[in-house]
Image (tube, rainbow, N blue to C red):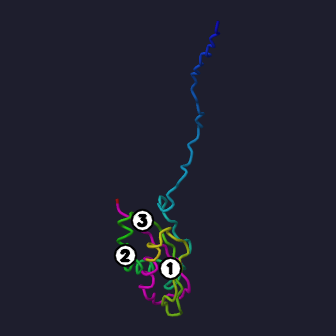
Amino acid sequence: MQKRHEQPTPTILDATLRIPVPNTVMEPLLKDTLARTEPRAQPKHPKQDKPGTGRLVHAIAKRKLAKHVFYPEEAVAAGLEGEVRLVLTLDGNGVVKDVQVADSSGHAILDQAAIRAAYAMGSLPGVNQREIILPVTFRLQP
């Protein structure tokens, strides 16, 4: 007579995993560092607004640079965005002698467009600073 081997009956577990929810709101893992939500602080020293120095130089440089910056069509088609920070080296007459990328946008095509625009500015008459750091933001409109 043969013995029948009986298979053990499988046990099914019924469990619910509960993850504790903290009472505090967690910061998002990725932050939009390009967005500006806070107003910029006003200068405490009005001396900075003299021609050729401080904020006024940056305002003049940004305005002139804006006339020469063009969003590359390839970048628009690919949906590329970013901010490039440029270091402009000027001679004693305010002529742009050198442009370097201090902080890349992460996209070479945007970095090169910003560099071309900076050289296209030509000069900043009356500027007595030798180096200026300028941000160039490439943002697509929704």
Q: What residue type is labelled 1?
A: Asp
Observer-nearest residue: 28 or 19? 19
Residue marked by disc 2: 70
32 drawn magenta: no
* Place of residue 109 in the rendered image (x, y in percent of width and height, measured from the top left): 44, 73
Which numbered mark, 2 or 3, is in the foreground of this view? 3
Residue marked by disc 3: 80
How far apart are labels 2 and 1 at the CA level?
29 Å
Magenta segment range?
113-141
- Describe the element under mark 2 as helix, strand or loop: loop
Q: Which amino acid does label 3 sit on?
A: Leu
Question: In the rendered view of the protein, which quadrant contains the N terminus?
Answer: top right
* Place of residue 106 in the rendered image (x, y in percent of width and height, measured from the top left): 50, 67
Q: Residue 49 carries which label?
A: 1
- Residue beneath the point at 49% across and 85% down: 51
Q: Quadrant of residue 47?
A: bottom right
Q: What residue type is labelled 2?
A: Phe
Which numbered mark, 1 or 3, is in the foreground of this view? 3
- In the image: residue 126, left or right of residue 18: left
